């Protein structure tokens, strides 16, 4: 199971389709001729309606990264977190990087394997045997201070930064956006899915993302099922809070209560700035 802890925070963000109904056809030359005769100018086509953005829109994705960083690192500057590493004593070993890759949950191992595949002989490659052995536990065996130092060194490498970006997207961001679009929820809903995946991961346990979603769907239908989006998201956030309270490390639910729930109550389903929220008592703003 993939999970996050508030201890880290104490240490210290569908394409729409416009369909026109043709009532009758008029030859283009006739229309053009009439327009020119009446105005002396060639008509200019009206601009197409702007498609609704998803969380994968670059501007929205940047907001998502900042929102998560406010909860994970008490900072909006998520790009400074590549070098972050510590044991937050949540039973998952080391937590590190921009999304909190954990040595005890497998995603840190996947990240270092990807980095090594792309850049053999990198400074973290020698820790792969140890990362495989500690996977599934909170052990530091074969890692320790030397690993911490080398992680921070690797974080200065653009290739390692890109590997972190790519694993974040593959494991957490892309699945959240894909499921959100399938459920026909907007940017805020897709973010709620993403944040839940970051904290809880996915799997068969009762607090996994999939089971949080199932718990919500037992209370409200998704828009894809003909339900109201706000009602469904309210049910999803209720289910998310329930899941967080199942583990002491997640008992502070402010990243939902004073952040995502605030946006929902305001009807800001597209996460349009300005955005104001609080996490663990700290205030944040995106203009």
Image (cartoon, rainbow, N blue to C red):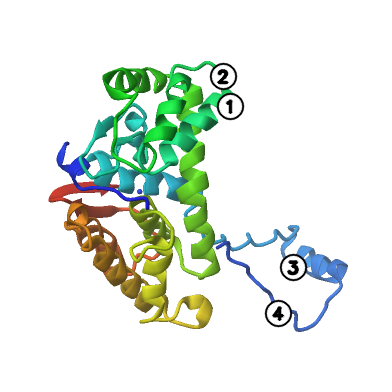
**Image location (x, y in percent) of residue 284:** 22, 47
Is 242 positioned to the left or the right of 110 in the image? left
Q: Residue at x 18, y 43 (%)?
A: 7
Within 10 Å of the Cα at label 3, are there few (<14), some (14-19), or many (20+) other Cα atoms? Answer: few
Residue at mark 2: 120
Residue drawn at x 51%, y 81% as measured from the top left: 225
Quarter where residue 26 is shown:
bottom right
Which residue is found at the position 39% from the left and 81% from the top?
218
Q: Which mark is residue 38?
A: 3
Q: Nearer the viewer, mark 1 or mark 4?
A: 1
Q: Does the rendering let one see residue 53?
A: no
Residue 70 lies, in percent from the top left, at 26, 44
- N-term mark: 3 or 4: 4
Instruction: Check contact, mark 2 vs mark 1: CB within 8 A.
Output: yes
Residue position marked by numbered label 4 in the rendering: 21
Q: Which mark is residue 117?
A: 1
Neighbor class of circle 1 (other Cα within 10 Å; few <14, some 14-19, many 20+) is few
Element assignment for label 3: helix
- From mark 2 to mark 3, how far is it between C-alphas? 70 Å
Sequence order check: which comes first, mark 2 or mark 4? 4
Whether residues under marks 3 and 4 lie with C-beta atoms below 8 angstroms apart, the answer is no
Q: CA distance from mark 1 to mark 4?
A: 52 Å
User: Of 44 and 76, which appears nearest the observer?
Assistant: 76
Estimate the spatial distance between the alpha carbons at disc 3 and disc 4, rounded to whole Å: 26 Å
User: In the image, is 81 to the left or to the right of 160?
Assistant: left
Q: CA distance from mark 1 to mark 3?
A: 67 Å
Say few, some or many: other residues with alpha carbon within 10 Å of mark 4 (under 14 / 14 to 19 / 20 or more): few
Number of the front mark, 2 or 3:
2
The percent coordinates of residue 134 (x first, y second) are 36, 35
Q: Nearer the viewer, mark 1 or mark 3?
A: 1
């Amino acid at each position: 199971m993939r999970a996050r802890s508030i201890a880290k925070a104490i240490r210290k963000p569908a394409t729409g389709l416009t369909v026109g109904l043709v009532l009758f056809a008029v030859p283009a030359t006739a229309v053009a001729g009439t327009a020119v005769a009446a105005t002396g100018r060639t008509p200019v086509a009206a601009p197409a309606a702007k498609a609704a953005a998803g969380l994968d829109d670059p501007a929205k994705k940047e907001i998502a990264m900042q929102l998560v960083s406010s909860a994970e690192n008490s900072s909006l500057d998520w790009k400074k977190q590549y070098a972050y590493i510590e044991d937050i004593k949540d039973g998952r070993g080391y937590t590190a990087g921009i999304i909190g890759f954990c040595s005890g949950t497998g995603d840190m191992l996947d990240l270092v394997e990807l980095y090594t595949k792309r850049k053999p002989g990198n400074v973290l490659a020698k820790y792969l045997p140890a990362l495989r052995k500690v996977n599934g536990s909170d052990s530091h065996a074969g890692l320790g201070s030397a690993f911490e130092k080398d992680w921070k060194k690797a974080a200065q490498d653009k290739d390692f930064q890109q590997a972190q970006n790519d694993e974040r997207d593959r494991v957490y961001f892309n699945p959240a956006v894909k499921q959100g679009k399938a459920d026909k929820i907007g940017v805020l809903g897709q973010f709620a899915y993403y944040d839940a995946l970051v904290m809880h991961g996915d799997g068969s346990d009762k607090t996994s993302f999939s089971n949080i979603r199932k718990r919500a769907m037992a209370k409200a239908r998704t828009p894809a099922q003909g339900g109201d989006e706000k009602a469904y998201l309210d049910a999803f956030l209720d289910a998310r809070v329930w899941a967080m309270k199942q583990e002491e490390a997640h008992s502070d639910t402010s990243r939902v209560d004073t952040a995502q729930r605030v946006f929902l109550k305001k009807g800001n389903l597209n996460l349009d700035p300005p955005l104001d929220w609080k996490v663990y008592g700290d205030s944040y703003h995106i203009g």
